[in-house]
C-alpha cells in the first residue's frame, strides 16, 4: 500500500497525532537535541569531547556562576516560601479584609514582566535611586540593591505568588476534620499547624517552590540588570553566546545544560518525595474562617497588605517614572508625556512587533492546544502519552537554550530565517504552548466523552464532531489558555534577545536595552504599555476562568 | 427495521478477554436486551456495535451487510447514552436536528422531522429550551428523540434509565417500550436491572465474563435458566445438594427421592425459587404430595408486601423463602423450628459446582 493510500485510510485523529508529533519533533525535540549535542563538541575542531563540561566544573568563572545560581535560586525560593505560606495561611483560615484585592495584586505581580522588578528596584535603591537619595539627605546609607541580596529580594517578591496561590488552594481544599481531630487529641494551635496543617499542604508548597526554583535558575533579566559582577549561569550563558557569536556556541550551551540539569534534578527530587505523600481527602467538612481580634488582627492585616504592596511597588514605580518629564535619558523634574512620545518616535515597531508576534503565536497555540488536548485526554495511545510528557519540556528549558537551538537548527542553508518574524512567532509558539494545552486539557477533562460519541454516532465525521461539539464546549478553556499564552508571550525576553535583529525588536528587548542605557523614562513608558496589555488580559481571564486564581499557575 | 447478526465477535484488552466469541441474531423489530452485572461485557458489546471500540475479530452485519469495519459515523446505528449526552450548547430543537443536519436533510424536512419526533416524546413545548433548563427525564427524552429522528437501522440504548429516580424510571420504561413498538425499530438495550430487562424485552441475553449465558424470551429465562449463573442472577434461587445413593438420588436436606427427575450422571444440585418454598406455622396440616424440609429459623425480615425467611436445614444448608406475611410466622423467635414444603414440580436441576448447566 502506498503511503498516500495509507494516509487516506487512517482516521482523522491518527493524522492529527502525526501532525502534532511532527511539529513537536521539528520545533521542540530537534532544536533541543541539537543544543544538547553542541555541549559535547569542541568549539574549534567540532570533534566529540567532554572538555566543555570539564571546563565548567573546574574553572572558577563557571563554578562561581554555578554556586551563585544555586545560591540565589535556593534563597529566593526560601524567601518566597517565608512570605507566601503565612500569607496563604492567614487568608485561608482567617477573615482578612480585602481578600480579593490581595489575590488580584498577587496575580498582577505574577504576570508582570519579570525584569520590571529588577530595574524598578534600581530606581529606588540603586546608586542614584530616589530612596537612596532621600535617605542620603538625612545621612542614612541605604544598602545597595546590586549583587546577590538584591537578586534574592527581587526573586522573593516576584515568585511568592506561586507559593501563596498554591498553598491557599490546598488549604481551602483541606478537610477541616483533620485539624479538628488534632485539636480533639490535645494539640495546641501551633502544634496543630506544624504537625497537621503544614504536612498536609506540603505537596502544594513544594510544587510552588519547585516552580519558583526553576524560574529563578532560568531567570536572565534580574541577574543581568542587578548582577554587577555577580554572575549566574543564565547571564554567563548569554555572554558566552555573545562572545561565541559566529562560531559554535559550545560554552553557552554547556552552561545551559548545567542549568537545565539543576532544574530537572530539583523536579525529580520533588516528584520522588511527593510520590510517598499522596493525601486523598473528601471535602466533606470544608474549612471555616476564624476572626482574629486585637493586636494580632492588626499585625496580620499589616503583614498581608504590606507584602502585596511591597511586591507591587516596582510596578507602581515604573508607571510613575513613565510620566516624569524627561529630556533624553535625564529626568528634569515635573511630569509629562515625553517618554511616551519617545516610544512613538524611536521604537514604534517594538510595540507593533510585540503584538504581531504574540498574536501570531497565540493563534497557533490556540489551534494546537485544542487538538493536542483532545489527543491527550481522549486517545489512549503511546503517542498521546509522549505528547503529554513533552508538554512539560518547555517549562524546563530556559529561553536561551530554546533560542540557541532555533539558531543552530534554522541558520544557514537556503532558508536562513534567524531574526525573522516567523521564527520568533514559532519560538513563542513552542515556548508558550503548554499554557494553552494545560488550560484546554483541564477544560476537556470536564466534558464527558459521550458528547463526541453522540455527535459521531449521529453521523458527524470525527473532525466535524470536534469542531461543532468539542470546540464550543471547551471554548472558555481555549480562551483562558490563549490569554495566558499571550501574557507570557508578550513578556518573553531571553529567547528574543538571541533571535531578534533590528527589524524584529520587541517591547521587552527594547525595555532591556533602555535599562542598560539608563533610559528609565523610555523603559518605564514601554513597561507601562506592557503592563496595561497584561492587566487587560488578566481581567479577561478573571471573566472567563472558572477558578480565577488557579488559572495562573 | 433491520436484523442484526453478530458472528464470532471477540474483543481483547491486552490479555483481558472483554468479549469471547459472541454470536447472536437479533430479528428485525425486536427489543433485544443485554443483561448482566457490571464488567460482563454488555456495554463493550453495545459500543462495539456502535463502532466506538474496534473488535479484535468477528463480524457484525445489519440486514446482511457487514458494518464492523465502517467508521462510527457511517454506521447508521443511533445510540441513547446513559448520561444523556445532550449537547449543552444547543437547544432541544438543535439537539434533535443534529443528526439530520449531518445527513444533509433540507431545512423544511428537518423542521417537520424534529416537530414530529418531539411530539412523540412529548417535548414539543420545550423545543427552544436549553438542556440545563430540563430535568433528567426530559433530557433523556431529548436523547431518545435525537436518536430516533434519523430513522436509524438499529437503536442502541446504554442503560438509558439508570440515572433517573425510581418512579420516573418505571414510567419512562413503559414509554420507551411503546415508542419502540410503534416505530418497529430494532433495539439493542443494555441494563443491569433484571426487572427492567424482563419487563421490556422480546429477548433477554444474559451475559457474564464476556460470554453469552443464555438468550431467550423473558419467561424462558426465568422459568428455565440455562445454568446456575442465570438462575441466580435473574431472580433469586436456593441451591440444595442432591446425594446419590445406590441406585437413587435424594435431597440432602429433607431426604426426598428425586432420582426419577435426574437423567444425567455426576454430581447434581437442585434449585428452588424462594417464592416456591412455603413456610408452615407449627401444627399445620401438610399436603403429603409436597417435599418437606425441616429447618431452624435464623431471621425474618418483614418488608410489608412480603416477608423473607432465612433458615438453615438440618443438613446445614441455607434456605431463603419469600411469602406473603403470616403473623404466626413473623412472631416466631429465632432458632425456633420451622417446616418448609415445596411442590416437586418446582424443582430444577443443575450440574453441581461452578456455573453448572441446567439438566434436562
Image: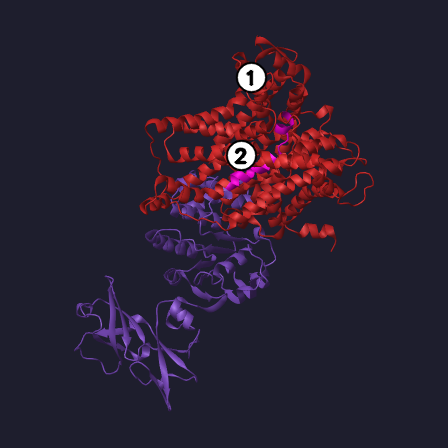
Q: Nearer the viewer, mark 2 or mark 1?
A: 1
Quadrant of the rendered image containing residue B296? bottom left
Q: Position of residue B89 (x, y in %)?
A: 48, 39
Q: Give the prevailing secondary structure in the magenta stretch.
A: helix
Which residue is disc 1 drawn over?
A: A132
Q: Which residue is mark 2?
A: A480
In the image, farthest residue toward the bottom: B246
Please tell me which residue lies in front, B225 or B125. B225
Q: Is residue B327 left or right of residue B241?
A: left
Q: Quadrant of residue A180?
A: top left
The magenta segment:
A206-225
Tell me the CA gap for discs 2 and 1.
Answer: 41 Å
Chain letter, colour red: A
Q: Please report whichever mark, 2 or 1, sits nearer to the chain's N-terminal start.
A: 1
The residue under the point 66% across, 51% down is: A10
For the rendered model, the colour scheme is: by chain
Q: Nearer the viewer, residue B328 or A336?
A: A336
Tell me, yes or no, if residue A312 can be seen here.
yes
- Mark 1 Cα shell of 10 Å, populated few (<14), some (14-19), many (≥20): many
Amino acid at each position: 500500500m502506498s503511503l498516500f493510500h495509507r494516509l487516506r485510510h487512517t482516521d482523522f485523529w491518527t493524522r492529527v497525532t502525526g501532525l502534532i508529533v511532527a511539529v513537536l519533533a521539528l520545533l521542540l525535540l530537534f532544536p533541543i537535541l541539537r543544543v544538547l549535542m553542541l555541549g559535547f563538541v569542541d568549539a574549534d575542531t567540532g570533534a566529540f569531547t567532554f572538555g566543555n563540561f570539564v571546563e565548567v566544573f573546574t574553572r572558577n568563572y563557571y563554578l562561581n556562576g554555578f554556586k551563585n545560581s544555586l545560591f540565589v535560586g535556593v534563597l529566593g525560593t526560601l524567601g518566597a516560601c517565608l512570605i507566601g505560606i503565612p500569607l496563604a495561611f492567614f487568608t485561608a483560615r482567617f477573615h482578612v479584609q480585602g481578600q480579593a484585592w490581595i489575590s488580584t495584586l498577587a496575580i498582577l505581580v505574577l504576570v508582570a514582566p519579570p525584569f520590571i522588578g529588577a530595574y524598578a528596584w534600581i530606581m529606588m535603591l540603586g546608586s542614584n535611586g530616589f530612596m537612596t537619595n532621600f535617605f542620603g539627605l538625612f545621612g542614612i546609607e541605604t544598602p545597595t540593591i546590586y549583587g546577590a541580596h538584591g537578586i534574592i529580594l527581587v526573586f522573593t517578591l516576584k515568585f511568592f505568588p506561586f507559593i501563596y496561590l498554591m498553598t491557599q488552594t490546598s488549604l481551602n481544599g483541606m478537610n477541616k476534620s483533620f485539624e479538628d481531630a488534632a485539636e480533639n487529641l490535645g494539640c495546641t494551635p501551633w502544634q496543630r499547624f506544624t504537625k497537621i496543617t503544614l504536612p498536609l499542604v506540603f505537596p502544594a508548597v513544594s510544587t510552588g517552590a519547585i516552580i519558583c526554583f526553576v524560574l529563578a535558575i532560568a531567570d536572565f533579566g534580574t541577574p543581568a540588570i542587578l548582577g554587577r559582577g555577580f554572575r549566574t549561569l543564565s547571564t554567563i550563558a548569554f555572554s558566552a553566546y555573545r562572545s561565541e557569536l559566529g562560531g559554535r556556541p559550545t560554552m553557552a550551551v554547556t552552561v545551559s545544560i548545567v542549568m537545565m540539569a539543576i532544574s530537572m534534578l530539583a523536579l525529580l527530587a520533588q516528584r520522588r518525595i511527593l510520590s510517598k505523600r499522596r493525601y486523598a481527602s473528601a471535602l466533606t467538612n470544608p474549612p471555616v474562617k476564624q476572626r482574629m481580634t486585637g493586636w494580632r488582627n492588626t499585625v496580620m492585616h499589616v503583614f498581608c497588605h504590606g507584602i502585596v504592596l511591597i511586591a507591587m511597588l516596582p510596578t507602581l514605580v515604573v508607571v510613575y517614572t513613565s510620566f516624569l518629564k524627561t529630556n533624553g535619558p535625564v529626568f528634569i523634574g515635573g511630569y509629562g508625556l515625553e517618554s511616551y512620545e519617545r516610544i512613538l518616535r524611536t521604537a514604534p515597531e517594538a510595540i507593533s512587533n510585540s503584538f504581531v508576534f504574540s498574536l501570531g503565536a497565540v493563534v497557533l497555540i490556540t489551534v494546537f492546544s485544542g487538538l493536542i488536548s483532545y489527543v491527550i485526554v481522549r486517545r489512549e495511545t503511546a503517542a498521546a502519552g509522549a505528547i503529554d510528557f513533552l508538554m512539560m519540556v518547555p517549562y524546563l528549558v530556559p529561553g536561551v537554550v530554546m533560542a540557541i537551538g532555533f539558531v543552530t537548527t534554522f541558520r544557514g542553508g537556503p532558508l536562513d530565517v534567524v531574526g525573522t518574524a516567523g521564527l520568533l512567532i514559532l519560538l513563542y509558539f513552542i515556548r508558550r504552548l503548554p499554557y494553552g494545552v494545560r488550560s484546554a486539557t483541564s477544560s476537556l477533562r470536564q466534558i464527558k466523552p459521550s458528547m463526541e460519541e453522540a455527535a459521531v454516532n449521529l453521523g458527524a465525521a470525527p473532525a466535524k464532531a470536534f469542531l461543532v461539539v468539542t470546540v464550543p464546549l471547551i471554548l472558555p478553556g481555549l480562551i483562558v489558555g490563549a490569554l495566558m499564552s499571550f501574557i507570557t508571550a508578550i513578556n518573553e525576553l531571553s529567547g528574543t534577545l538571541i533571535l531578534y535583529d533590528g527589524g524584529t525588536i520587541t517591547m521587552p528587548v527594547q525595555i532591556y536595552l533602555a535599562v542598560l542605557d539608563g533610559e528609565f523614562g523610555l523603559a518605564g513608558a514601554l513597561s507601562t504599555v506592557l503592563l496595561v496589555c497584561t492587566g487587560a488580559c488578566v481581567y479577561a481571564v478573571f471573566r472567563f476562568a472558572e477558578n480565577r486564581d488557579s488559572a495562573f499557575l | 427495521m433491520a436484523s442484526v447478526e453478530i458472528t464470532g465477535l471477540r474483543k481483547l484488552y491486552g490479555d483481558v478477554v472483554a468479549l469471547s466469541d459472541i454470536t447472536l441474531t437479533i430479528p428485525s423489530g425486536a427489543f433485544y436486551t443485554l443483561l448482566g452485572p457490571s464488567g460482563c461485557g454488555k456495554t463493550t458489546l453495545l459500543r462495539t456495535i456502535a463502532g466506538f471500540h474496534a473488535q479484535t475479530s468477528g463480524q457484525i452485519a445489519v440486514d446482511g451487510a457487514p458494518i464492523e469495519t465502517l467508521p462510527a459515523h457511517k454506521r447508521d446505528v443511533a445510540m441513547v447514552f446513559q448520561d444523556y449526552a445532550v449537547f449543552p450548547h444547543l437547544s432541544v430543537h438543535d439537539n434533535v436536528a443534529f443528526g439530520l443536519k449531518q445527513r444533509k436533510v433540507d431545512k423544511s424536512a428537518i423542521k417537520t422531522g424534529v416537530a414530529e419526533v418531539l411530539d412523540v416524546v412529548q417535548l414539543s413545548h420545550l423545543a427552544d429550551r436549553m438542556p440545563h433548563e430540563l430535568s433528567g427525564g426530559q433530557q433523556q427524552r431529548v436523547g431518545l428523540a435525537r436518536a430516533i429522528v434519523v430513522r436509524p437501522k438499529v437503536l442502541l440504548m446504554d442503560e438509558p434509565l439508570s440515572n433517573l429516580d425510581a418512579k420516573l424510571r418505571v414510567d419512562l420504561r413503559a414509554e420507551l417500550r411503546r415508542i419502540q413498538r410503534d416505530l418497529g425499530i430494532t433495539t439493542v438495550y443494555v441494563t443491569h436491572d433484571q426487572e427492567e430487562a424482563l419487563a421490556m424485552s422480546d429477548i433477554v441475553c444474559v451475559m457474564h465474563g464476556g460470554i453469552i449465558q443464555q438468550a431467550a424470551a423473558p419467561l424462558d429465562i426465568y422459568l428455565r435458566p440455562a445454568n446456575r449463573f442465570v438462575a441466580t442472577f435473574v431472580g433469586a434461587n436456593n441451591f440444595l445438594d442432591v446425594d446419590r445413593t445406590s441406585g437413587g438420588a435424594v435431597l440432602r436436606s429433607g431426604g426426598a427421592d428425586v432420582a426419577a427427575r435426574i437423567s444425567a450422571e455426576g454430581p447434581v444440585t437442585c434449585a428452588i425459587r424462594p417464592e416456591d418454598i412455603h413456610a408452615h406455622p407449627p401444627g399445620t396440616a401438610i399436603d403429603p404430595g409436597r417435599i418437606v424440609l425441616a429447618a431452624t429459623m435464623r431471621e425474618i425480615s418483614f418488608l410489608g408486601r412480603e416477608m423473607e425467611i432465612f433458615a438453615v436445614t438440618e443438613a446445614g444448608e441455607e434456605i431463603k423463602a419469600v411469602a406473603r406475611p403470616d403473623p404466626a410466622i413473623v412472631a416466631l423467635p429465632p432458632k425456633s423450628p420451622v417446616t418448609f414444603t415445596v411442590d416437586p414440580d418446582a424443582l430444577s436441576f443443575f450440574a453441581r459446582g461452578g456455573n453448572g448447566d441446567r439438566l434436562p
